[in-house]
């Protein structure tokens, strides 16, 4: 029961944020729903949910690992250089075909844009 509840909190937090979140962001947003949510239990839930493909881990250079809900389609990510938050860019996208050299097997890719998010660009 407890496990189901944690799983649901994590899913709802990710759904509401609608962008990839770090472990810490998931924990602090989750605590708004369950104040006694424990760090170790969240870590364990994240591990199990990642293994079950209920959430997807995404990594960007120089950034902590983030998690998002499985997407229906390929989409680029966006890093705000001001607040360091990562967003999904809601645009249809296809990864370019890569003719990899012999011996390389390409199984996926990631397109990352950078700039300033709406919150940060409105500050000035
Ligand atoms: Zn920002």
Image (spheres, helix red, strand yellow):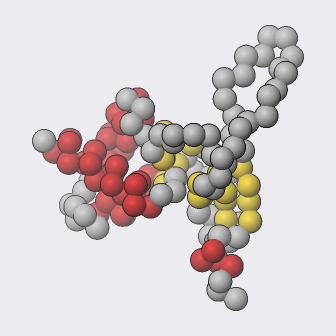
Image x and y of residue 117, in percent: 65, 70
Is 57 above or below relative to 90? above
Task: Tell me the quadrant of ligand 1.
Answer: bottom right
Q: Count up the numbered dots.
A: 0
Query: What's the residue at 68%, 79% (across, down)?
Result: 121
Asked if residue 116 can be seen in this view, the reply is yes
The N terminus, quarter of image: top left
Query: What's the residue at 85%, 21% (across, down)?
Result: 99
Image x and y of residue 50, in percent: 42, 35
Residue furthest to the left: 1
Residue furthest to the bottom: 124
Image x and y of residue 37, in percent: 25, 56
Image x and y of residue 13, in percent: 36, 57
Is 92 above or below relative to 78? above
Asked if residue 27 can be seen in this view, the reply is no
- Residue 26 is drawn in which quadrant? bottom left
Query: What's the residue at 16%, 45% (across, down)?
Result: 2
Left or right of residue 52, residue 65 in this image = right
Left or right of residue 94, residue 36 in this image = left
The C terminus, quarter of image: bottom right
């Amino acid at each position: 029961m407890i496990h189901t509840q944690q799983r649901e909190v994590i899913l709802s937090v990710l759904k509401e944020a609608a962008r990839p979140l770090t472990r810490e962001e998931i924990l602090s947003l989750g605590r708004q729903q369950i104040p006694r949510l424990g760090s170790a239990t969240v870590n364990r839930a994240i591990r199990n949910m990642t293994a079950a493909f209920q959430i997807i881990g995404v990594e960007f250079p120089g950034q902590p690992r983030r998690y998002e809900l499985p997407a229906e389609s390929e989409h680029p990510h966006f890093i705000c250089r001001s607040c360091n938050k990562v967003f999904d860019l809601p645009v249809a996208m296809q990864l370019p075909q890569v003719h990899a050299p012999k011996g390389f097997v390409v199984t996926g890719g990631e397109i990352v844009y950078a700039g300033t998010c709406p919150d940060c660009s409105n500050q000035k």
